[in-house]
Image: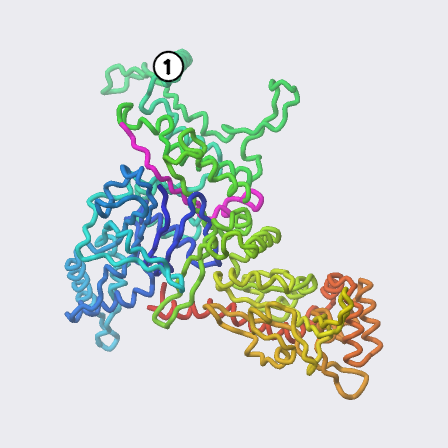
Amino acid sequence: MRIKFVEISNFRKLKSTHLDLDKKTTILVGANNSGKTSAMVALRTFLMTPTRLALRDITIANWTEIDVLGEEWEFEAETTVDLDTLLPALDVWLEVPLSEIQHVVHILPTLDWSGGLLGVRLRYQIKDIGKLKAEYVAERVASGSAATTGPAGEQIKLAVWPLCLTDFLERRLRAHLELAAFPLDPRAVTRPGKCGLAVPQDLPASALRFDHPPFKNLIKMDEIAAQRDFADAGDHEGGEDKAEAGVRRFKRRLSDQLRSYYDRHLDPSKTPTEKDYEALGAIQAAERSFDSRLEAGFAAAFEELEDLGYPGMSNPKLKISTLLRTTDGLKHGSSVQYQVADPSGDGTKTLKLPEDYSGLGYQNLIAMVFMLMGFRDEWMRVEKAGIVGGENVVHEIQPLHLVLVEEPEAHLHAQVQQVFINKAYNLLRKHCDLGDKDAYCTQLLVSTHSSHVAHEADFANLRYFRRRPAKSKGETPTTTVANLSHVFGEGDETKRFVKRYLKATHCDLFFADGVIFVEGQAERILVPHFIRHHFPELSRRYVTLLELGGSHVHSFRDLIDVLGIATLIIGDLDATATVKITDKNGHETTRWKSARPELGRGQQTANSVLKEWHPGLKLIDELAALPPSDHATSGDGYDLYVAYQKPISVESSSATPTSVIPRTFEDALVLTNTAAMADVQGSSTSAKIKAIVTQGPSGADLADELFDLLKTAEKAALALDCLMLADPKALKPPTYIAHGLKWFETAVGKEIAESELKAGSIHGRG
């Protein structure tokens, strides 16, 4: 049995979101503010702390309709809004083999169910809509009469709570809310549409709710939450909910973890068994011995006190009763120590340091590992956890253990993150009844912003949260989730290449607001320089840069289509011309070979991006004449721009400037910065370029000489020399790159700006 997928509705940014869960480990990735934390909080709220739902957890786009309902109540108009349909819901779909029917018999939708999918909807609803209406209308009437007298005796109306129904529900929602559970029809499951939004099935009017929580004996859920205490005061309003016991606050000290583990599993004073009697006897013997020693030591002092004869007291006797607690030995700073050396070689004189002297990353890793061990042993009823309430009380073990880890990078540095994600799942299964056995299922769900965590995960484990802009002013941006295991076909060579490239480069593509593809090392070095000094707005965005040869960029097309982030491809025109050659059989034939770009020669591009992705053209003449607006496209919900060399005007020794099409980025860089190149120095490549430029050849001759030089020169060395210019702004990007970066600056900021505008237009809050 396992959780196959969940569908979240009306919860924060997750208006209607489908999330597939892997059989073992699922990693939630995505750009900032894409909904990863919302998904984790939704699962926690529905499955662990259902009484903690607040108005701000309801998708803000629904607030307008909620306020419409409030106005209809105030004016006694016919209601057009069903409040229950605007409240959060969670559909949990289990995959259950028929052999495990005994665990799910209480949630079967029909008696003829024969294994496979089983669905349950957890839905918030209003307990008594009539009572809510009456309370709200009464409060609105009272607030309407609130007024004060002005300086001239005039009546000044005051704006007091509640201003509208959402304002009322911010304080009173929990009092009117309940969580109901309903069975779903496995035959009516609908996969997400092309846009990625979930399509939850409609509940029939005759649907009967479950009398008891359906997952109480099915799912054991635990969570390691990220530390947000310094910023999220709302988490602690109203005290802690008892159901939040499974949400463990991170404790860095291992001694704290050991003490918690001891309390749950080992304390001999809790439901003692025969294994504990020896320990309890030793503790009580120690107490008696200590009592005797203290009584002897304090005997003289107590005699003096007894001679006081305090009025009203009939000869009081002072006695000492020692109480030794087994956890006292774990409460001091050196209760856990690390052995750092053994000079004696036989363990008799080891050198030890308290745990605080260990590295912080190592401490945190050990602490998190111990928390996972505690989750596992509590689930498996290890030691005391199995006999709480008495030895004869049977504690049924839930068949499914769901463990949430929110942003482990909040506690772990880069190298330790990789260790953690590699070991976490196996640690949760390290028990004699778990391992590779199928009787009990463990599913680990991790949200992260860390490329180090994503780097260690298999492609099939990643779930990408894609931000989708609001469709209209009355709506808010939403989120869809892509299962990256579905991006490429099984055994696809392209998939293999993309996976290996992303692992080799350790890139942060899955967390960026936009991506720039470049072809060579020089672009890889200088494009960030151009962004920093010529496009300051773009430098504030989270952009990733991938260096790929032009023949490989198109391999990323399917992945970019799924991620839906703004994409700039900076490539080369790669002009080719036909030449006649003689083959090995002595026959004359025609081949396409690399050539200097020239117009009117019937040349074609060899760049697969230009031919197969965008703009879908082959002829150099057509590509050179393409207007700037046609370099961009907005297909499949994201923006794409392809930049390549175009004709530029180059000053020459003659009076008339010459039009030249550069062959490479380096050619274009020098031709655009002939004056600045006189100040570039360092490598032999820079010296040779300076000599060529100083001679002042004509535009075409200059381009040819540069190309011949740069074919074998160290291009990266030239780029590094350019970084050393005294005035960083003196080096200008080639025109085609400048146009691309200008477009990219707008495209990356567009979604964020529109999201803030449209979200802020609703009530001016949220």
Please state if 585 lies on the left or on the right of 348 as rendered: right
Q: Nearer the viewer, residue 55 or 501?
A: 501
Which residue is at 42% across, 49% downward? 229
Which residue is at 24% across, 19% downward? 313
Q: Quadrant of the N terminus?
A: top left
The magenta stretch is: 394-417
Numbered marks: total: 1
Q: Nearer the viewer, residue 146 or 53?
A: 53
Quadrant location of residue 687? bottom right
User: Residue 745: horizontal and vertical position, in percent?
Assistant: 55, 70
Say above or below: 266 vs 594.
above
Say above or below: 615 vs 649.
above
Which residue is at 27% across, 63% downward? 166
Quadrant location of residue 372? top left
Whether residue 546 is visible to the viewer of this picture, yes or no, is yes
Q: Secondary structure at mark 1?
A: helix
Please state if 571 lies on the left or on the right of 290 as rendered: right
What's the residue type where badge 1 is placed? Gly
Say above or below: 523 vs 223.
below
| Residue ID for mark 1 | 281
Please state if 231 lies on the left or on the right of 213 as rendered: right
